[in-house]
Amino acid sequence: MRGAGWIKGLREAEARELRSDIDRLEIDLIAAANSRGQSTLHDVANTLRCKKARLERLEEFLGSMTSKGRPATSATPPHEGRR
């Protein structure tokens, strides 16, 4: 079984990747707005919104690990809204 430090490192790496994706998507959003492609603009904006929401959940998770040494509720990461 892996420890809390391993989980934290995994989530920090995921957060770094999400920040990079968000930066790229913000540039794509500007390009899509300038191209007047409504479907492209909608797709990029939706993806950007989802990634920002995931990053926010990851930051909350990491904050709870940092402040208390481990997550407040469980060692499992927060679930995305999949059905």
Image (cartoon, rainbow, N blue to C red):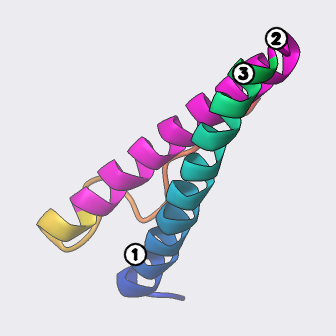
Of the two numbered discs 2 and 1 in the rendering, the one whose residue sits closer to the viewer: 2
Magenta stretch?
36-64
Q: Could you tell me which quadrant the C terminus lies in?
A: top right
Question: What mark, if any, has residue 16 been given in the picture?
Answer: none
Q: How crowded is mark 2: few (under 14 residues within 10 Å), some or many (20 or more)?
A: few
35 on left or right of 52? right
Q: Which of 35 and 41 is in front in this view?
A: 35
The amino acid at mark 2 is Gln
Q: Is 16 positioned to the left or the right of 39 in the image?
A: left
Q: Element type at marker 1? A: helix
- Image quadrant containing the N terminus: bottom right
Q: How crowded is mark 3: few (under 14 residues within 10 Å), some or many (20 or more)?
A: few
Q: Is mark 3 on a helix, strand or loop?
A: helix
- Rendered location of residue 53, percent (x, y): 49, 36
> CA gap, disc 3 to disc 2?
10 Å
* Main secondary structure along the magenta-highlighted residues: helix
**Residue 57 is drawn in which quadrant?**
top left
Residue 2 versus residue 60: which sits nearer the camera?
60
Q: Can residue 81 be seen in this view?
A: no
* Residue placed under numbered mark 3 in the picture: 34
Q: Name the residue under label 2.
A: 38
What kind of element bears circle 2? helix
Q: Indicate which label's residue lies in the foreground, 1 or 3.
A: 3
Mark 1 = which residue? Answer: 8
Tell me the kind of residue under disc 3.
Asn
Residue appearing at x 56%, y 47% in the figure = 22
Given the image, on which type of amino acid does mark 1 rest?
Lys
